[in-house]
Amino acid sequence: MSETAVKAPGVPDANRWKALVFIALAQLMVVLDATIVNIALPSAQQDLGISDGNRQWVVTAYALAFGGLLLFGGRIADLWGRKRAFVVGLGGFAAASALGGAATNEAMMFGARALQGAFGALLAPAALSLLAVMFTDAKERAKAFGIYGAIAGGGGAVGLILGGFLTEYLDWRWTFFVNIPFAIVAAAGAYFVIREPEGGRNRSPLDVPGVILSTLGLVSLVYGFTRAESEGWSDSLTIGMFVASGVLLLAFVLVESKVKAPLLPLRVVTERNRGGVYLSLGLAIIAMFGLFLFLTYYLQVVKGYSPVKTGFAFLPMIVGMITGSTQIGARLMTRVAPRLLMGPGFLVAAVGMLLLTQLEIGSSYAALLLPAMLMLGLGMGTAFMPAMALATQGVEARDAGVASAMVNTSQQVGGAIGTALLNTIAASATTSYIKDHIGSAASKPQQQLVQLEGMVQGYTSAIWFAVGILVVAAGIALTLINAGRPGTTAVTGSGAEAADEVPVPVVAH
């Protein structure tokens, strides 16, 4: 650790804006990795001889390690120091990416993805809690997190575009190798630029039973939903995973209420406003993640778009997200109560989602998809900013890492639930539509048309559910969250009233 790694509390960090560049770059890499690998998956599967049955493990291995280890990663960041955890996380992520790019068989690929998830779980909470303790003025914080949120929110679409280019014009292995320069630049920049405030470490002993119970409980939950998607909800192992997850997480809560130095202090999650934020954000993520998947398939399979064209088709959503995040959320965050941005934001996103229930095979991109994506992005960008500022407002600096991890955990679990739940709804609607209409299709072209109509019918059925989920998220935000507008006074990065921290959505994998 360099001598410049620590600064006095209460003094704004002179290098804070430079630090934002490197922290945002690291977050872009993690978010980008979600969609970039999905586009490369068909080519990688063919090259490495991965069976259709095992294909999902390229995504699942990452999701299980990332979702399961986030709380542990956040606690390690509080214990070691966030700068050290951030740099180690980046180094590990780069090494795991090199291993994935060099994979010669499926075992090597699955191992590399699990390692990426593990180091991502260390990196994400460290990055977010670093920002929280470095930006101590409320107006500056709103601006910094607006920029950061826009970069991280846009990473998914950047991944689709970059993944499309790399897969089409180079080789799928480059979707892994591309992480290495990102990680080296971010780690070197962080090492020389970031100085952590004093007094923000949590040096209490590690809660080992809490680590084991939370990791196993979250892994069981994420795997249960992932398995439900492929094997169905009535599968005995799926049910067993949900039961095990319930028992383990209940035991985790009991342990946390008894031990002296808990992994997740229950005060972090039981405060009314934070509880409302975690719940409404988790629901919004459920609605969003299913949609990403459906639109990707709709554009590629039904509309016949190339991977590159599909990536560019998502740009309006990203423009909406950047505008909502930096121009609406960040500007109003210090003037308006969070629920008055979150509730309407989720409702605007719900209207965008409602437009997509009108999808048909011949739907016009400009007339339907473009306005729907813009509204979705605008609504989500506006709601995410104050939500994430509030998610760790008033948390003690020594809990900043684990509080950040809690938000990321709710998003990871929300992503797993969203993909499984909405996929299951879509699949059953598609099956029943095809069963009802295939009999009247005599020729092969007619049968193919019925198949495509069935797919679109499945997507719109699931999107109706997503609309309902977003309306519920808006209702929770408006009723549960009762905080006034954030103050505009400076807060220190350590001590009882820690800097508001604004974690950013990490795309589920």
Image (cartoon, rainbow, N blue to C red):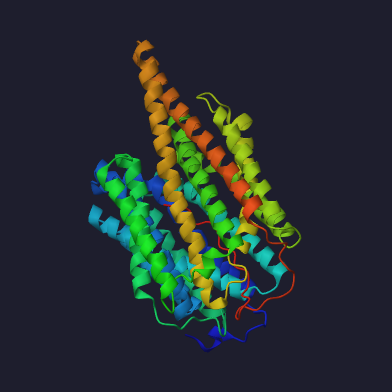
Among all residues in the image, which is located at the extreme right? 335
Q: Nearer the viewer, residue 24 or 489?
A: 489
Kindly tell me whether residue 477 is visible in this rendering: yes
Q: Measured from the top left, where is residue 35 in percent x and y?
A: 45, 49
Q: Measured from the top left, where is residue 309 in percent x and y?
A: 50, 39
Q: Nearer the viewer, residue 198 or 425?
A: 425
204 is higher (above) or lower (below) than 306: below
Q: Nearer the viewer, residue 265 or 10?
A: 265
Residue in view at x 58 percent, y 47 percent: 473
Q: Locate residue 256: give its quadrant.
A: bottom left
Among all residues in the image, which is located at the extreme bottom? 3
Residue in view at x 40 percent, y 82 percent: 205
Instruction: Indicate left or right for 427 with 108 as reference.
Output: right
Report the number of numbered marks.
Answer: 0
351 is higher (above) or lower (below) than 223: above
Kindly tell me whether residue 87 is visible in this rendering: no
Instruction: Indicate left or right for 490 with 169 as reference.
Output: right
Q: Nearer the viewer, residue 207 or 259?
A: 259
Q: Measured from the top left, where is residue 139 in percent x and y?
A: 72, 67
Residue in view at x 38 percent, y 61 percent: 249
Q: Measured from the top left, where is residue 264 in percent x and y?
A: 46, 70
